[in-house]
Image: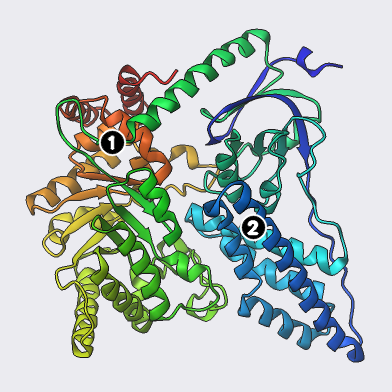
Amino acid sequence: MDSRANPEVTVTGIAASHGIAYGQIFVYLQSDVEVPAYQVEPEKRIDEVARFDRALVVTRQQISKIKNEVEKNLGPEEAAIFDAHLMVLEDEALIGETIREFESTGRNIETCFHKISSRYVQAFAEIDDEYLRERAGDLRDVAQRVLQNLLGQAENSLSRLAEKRIVVATDITPSDSATLDRSAALALVMDAGSKTSHAVIVARSMKIPSVVGLRNLTTRVNDGDWAIVDGYDGLVILNPTESTLFRYGKIQERKKSFEARLMEVNRQPAVTLDGLTVTLQANIERADEVAKAKSFFADGIGLYRTEFLFLNSSRVPPEQEQFLAYKAVIEEMAPKAVVVRTLDLGGDKPLAGKADLFPKENNPFMGFRAIRFCLEHQDIFKDQLRAILRASAFGKARLMFPMISGTEELARAVAVVDECKAELRGLGVAFDESMEIGTMIEIPSAAVTADLLAKQCAFFSIGTNDLIQYLLAIDRVNDRIAHLYEPTHPAVLRTLKQIVDEAHRQKIPVSVCGEMAGDPVYTPLLLGLGVDSLSMSPAWLPSVRYFVRAMTMADARKLAAEALTMSSPKEIYARCDEFYRARVKTD
């Protein structure tokens, strides 16, 4: 029976890759590799280790082939995704722990590898940072390949879709998405996933619409069902009616026209209609993302998250290795500034292979992390600070501390910087003596004492993701209460205003680098509250720039003043959305 005769149903998820697609569904269900468990006879244990080595070599060859294909078809930036996969296969801790598990238990190598790799996957899956949490998918992807090769199983693939289809899956691994048949995949739809998953990054590169976070959609649809995927608003419309199809045809035409305008305007300066220039910067995790930031005409790097260097390794990277990474970013962005955030590691971001540094905690979000970890482990902290200071000689760098709770903590951190400066002077090593030091404002105690902190640093950067989470006591990755995470809550707006006012009294600038900064609906609200600059994922720059050029700062200030008198988060958001829609016609 034709499923289009069934009632139309709209399912809401998270818009991950823009575009609109219409067609029939292909349900792609992957099952975990079933791992047999048995004892290996002592005389066969050398052969068992050799079998493991061969599986690692074959897996490395497979991933290298995928990487080469992606580089040829999509480009080096997308291919770099698979560098992380290859590094997993070189991870001394993962491989070493597997061998030690085998030597101590005598269990077959599949069982040992599955146990150790699963522990690593779980550790990364519990990380709060969305981008870094996605590395659990990388680890799982590689582990599945290794197990398939150990067991002699054929690898799963989406490279040969029989016909044009909307691919619906529980999740899609990076290697699945990389081998996707671009001529046949109309859209990617996933029960799980996020905007930063590697599958989504590949989908965006291929210009394939994608919606994620649909929970149990795979259990509600069948092969052959008809659907519309709306990658703009995060909707999947099952069994669309003729009127819905007609409406989406018109929407698709207008969206394509609007996106073309966005990219054209993105080459223009971010200047409001009443002549005020707004600084728009980019957030990055890796040195290879600088090229994208520059391609979107970022005014600098407002947040360089350095923990990726640590989380991408089973060891603490030495000072020289860190120096080269920081230097690459600072040198390439020069003369524009790069804000280098010191290590935000620990608690919910454990370092694989260094469990002794991060004891298990009941509440990692408020635990032993970030600046608390660094001040406790000053050997690690000083290596990083010296690396950043040395790199500052090659461009314009600013140093920023995360998770500062008050003035004493900030003073202790600055004192360690001063020690590192003295050490480098003693060695005759060049660095920028006037490098500015700032602090993230993401803990309520820091917000309340912003007047005191502003006297001790050169700038503030507000991390709205954590600040909102802590202010409202809302775990934003908890599905049951995530709907209560409201950036327009009056407590949030009043706190932002207080931070900005106290900073400006001390004549220091304020940036916002959380997710609010990349949503154009919030742009006039933040600028109207007095925020000096916005820093976001590079891909969000065109939308925010376009809106800045479509509004006046005078109107933004009126909107912020009005919002501060309102009591309902939903009404405040509706007012911001109305302000946005009145000035930007996206349809």
Residue 566, position as x, y percentages in the image: 25, 27
Q: Amino acid at mark 1?
A: Pro
- Is 361 left or right of 261, judged from the image as shown? right
Name the foreground residue: 542 vs 210: 542
Q: Vertical placement of 84 versus 261: above or below?
A: below
Q: In which quadrant will I find the N terminus? A: top right
Residue 92, position as x, y percentages in the image: 62, 80
The image's colouring method is rainbow
* Of the two numbered discs 1 and 2 in the rendering, the one whose residue sits closer to the viewer: 2
Q: Are marks 1 and 2 in contact (CB under 8 Å)?
A: no
Q: Vertical placement of 20 versus 498: above or below?
A: above
**Residue 522 appears in the rendering:** no
Label ID, residue 67: 2
**Residue 388 appears in the rendering:** yes
How crowded is the residue under tag 1: few (<14 C-alpha within 10 Å), some, or many (20+)? some
Picture quarter containing residue 164? top right
Q: Vertical placement of 481 versus 42: above or below?
A: above
Q: Residue at x 84, y 88 (%)?
A: 46
Name the foreground residue: 356 vs 262: 262
Q: Residue at x 14, y 58 (%)?
A: 454
Instruction: List the residue tagged with mark 1.
Output: 490
Residue 554, position as x, y percentages in the image: 15, 26
Q: Secondary structure at mark 2?
A: helix
Q: Amino acid at mark 2?
A: Lys
Q: Secondary structure at mark 1?
A: helix
How many numbered tags mark residues here?
2
